[in-house]
Every structure is written in C-alpha cells, then in structure tokens.
Amino acid sequence: MGGWAIAVHGGAGVDPNLPMERQEQAKQLLTRCLNLGISALRSDLAAIDVVELVVRELEADPFFNSGRGSALTAKGTVEMEASIMDGPNRRCGAVSGLTTVKNPVSLARLVMDKSPHSYLAFSGAEDFARQQGVEVVDNEYFITEDNVGMLKLAKEANTILFDYRIPLGLESCSAGVESPLVMNGLPIRVYAPETVGCVVVDSQGRCAAATSTGGLMNKMTGRIGDSPLIGAGTYACNLCGVSCTGEGEAIIRGTLAREVAAVMEYKGLGLQDAVDFVIKERLDDGKAGLIAVSNKGEVAYGFNCMGMFRGCATEDGFMEVEIWE
C-alpha cells in the first residue's frame, strides 16, 4: 500500500472565459474540501467516512451544483440525487428525486447502512429520510437567485443547460461554439460546473467514492442522471474508487465508473492508463471527466472537454488544485 490519497471534483467542462474571480472561488472551495479530507485521513477516519464528509461540505456551498445551489427542473423546483460506495464488499447506497433533504449524500449512506436496499427515490426516499431523522428543509433553501435567472434563459432557448453558473450569453461558451453539443435532440449551448464528487483511499488501502448533483438546468421532472447510478457515476471496489461528471446520458451508456475498475482488473492496466482508456474509448461522442484513486495510494483524473474543476492530495505531501489541462 502506498498511503492515503484523495481527489475531489466540481464538474467537467469549463467556459474558457470564466472570470478569474470565479476561478479563484472554485479553487478556494476545492482547497477547503481537500484540507477537510486530509485532516480526516490524518486522524485515521475510514475512506467511506471521508468521502461523505467532503461531499457534505460541497453540498452546503452553493458554488457547484449539489445540495444548496442545485440546478432547477423545468418546473422551477430542485430534485437532487447522490450515491456512495464502499470498496470493501462493494456496499453502496443511492437516492434520487430528493426535494427537502439537506445532505443527499448522507441519506445515500443511510440507505447503504440502515436499509435492506441499495437505491431509494422520490417519495420513498423522502419518507426514509424522515424515518431516519435526517435534517430536512424547504425546497426554497436549495434555490438561488442565479439559478432562477439561468432557468429563465434556458426556457427562452428551449435548452438543457449544463453550465448554469456562467450567464455570459448562451452563444459564448466552451463546448464547441462552431458545432454545439446535442443531447436528447436539444442543443447544449453551455457546459461547465455541475456534479460534485470525492474519491478516497485510506491508509489501510480501502477505497470509497461519492457523487452528488442537482442534475441539469431545465431538466424534465423525474429525470435521473448518472450520479446516483452505481457503476455509471460512482463505483468503488478493492482496486479503486471512481466519481464521474459530465453528460449523464453518455456516462450511463458507457458505465464509465465501473469501466475503470474493469480494465484494471481484466486488462491489467494501472490507474492512470485505465482512466485514459475509458475516457478515450467509452464515451463515444459524449463529454465527461472523472477522478479516481487506487488501493496503492495513486490518484488520477481524465476528461475530454474544456477543463475540469478538480483537486487531489496524497500522503507524501503532494497537493494540487486545477481547472485546465
């Protein structure tokens, strides 16, 4: 074993014109979350506890799209989803369609620990939250003024927005101005910060992963993305932990997170080679990114779009927080 390692992300695909002030805000948030995780790992907290702790911190900050600050549905409400997975014995929990649960990732953890199931959604998940006594708030808590404005823009353009954080004009963003991305037949004119996630390997070589999101701006109510789907947006096993971000439908089709573990196991690839292979070979025309750790204390990331909000640290003192290549 090579010691502990941690990585966090705040979304893949970043507008190259993102103001420096916003870039610094993102880096400060990722740095704060990394330091929180580092402190927990130095205190010998288990990997599964660290990923929950860090993602809770990300959910509490409205900068990225999870918890407070989540994207709005076409009806102007918030429907959140999250998942968590513990590498040893591949235990997992997931939730979708949450409207009042303050920290979706912690409800996913309770599904894993306190229920006979792996996945609860909508009214069943809300009922379970109340049975477990988790903190709930009004839906308005999650809604920000910025998101209300971006939903209006999305409706005017009849568009699903990935990057609802940068109101620079729908025609000015990064995901290929000359050839806009299309998802489910609708143009995606903006593409940047969204899903958050964390992967950790602790000092005992145990891997864990967690992912949380509000989904797409102007999404249909009831839409479920990759983030709560084990094997797609989140996966952990005895070899590695993976959290994905990007075009959910493409990530689902490619079972992206599980593929990293699969090529490590069946092709014998190392962590970074596995990440590179999956990003290149399993996304087809989709745009996405992911972070990963291995049971050897390695950390890796990959993306095929313009930048990814990310940070990582290892027990030997290495630490970085980056946005661009």
Image: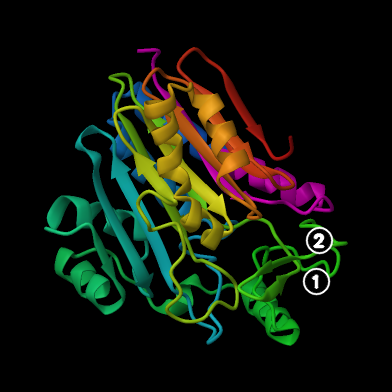
Q: Position of residue 167 (x, y in %)?
A: 77, 68
Q: Position of residue 96 (x, y in %)?
A: 36, 67
Mark 2 neighbour density, 10 Å: few (under 14) some (14–19) many (20 or more): many
Question: 228 or 182: which is nearer to us?
Answer: 182
Looking at the rendered structure, which numbered label has been put on residue 173?
A: 2
The kind of residue tagged 1 is Leu
Height in image: 18 above or below 154?
above
The residue at 81%/61% (across/down) is: 173
Question: 7 or 276: which is nearer to us?
Answer: 276
Does dot 2 land on a helix, a strand or a loop? loop
Compared across the picture, whether 48 is left or right of 62 comes to: left
| Residue 239 shows up from this direction | yes
The residue at 50%/47% (across/down) is: 244
Height in image: 248 above or below 321?
below
Task: Pick the quarter of the image with the C terminus.
Answer: top right
Does dot 1 land on a helix, a strand or a loop? loop
Height in image: 51 above or below 71?
above
Please check the rendered image and state whether residue 27 is part of the magenta-colored stretch, yes or no. yes
Q: Are marks 2 and 1 in contact (CB under 8 Å)?
A: yes
Compared across the picture, whether 46 is left or right of 77 comes to: left
| Residue 65 shows up from this direction | no
> To which residue does mark 1 refer?
170
The kind of residue tagged 2 is Cys
Region of the chain picked out in magenta, as a range: 1-30
Height in image: 266 above or below 248?
above
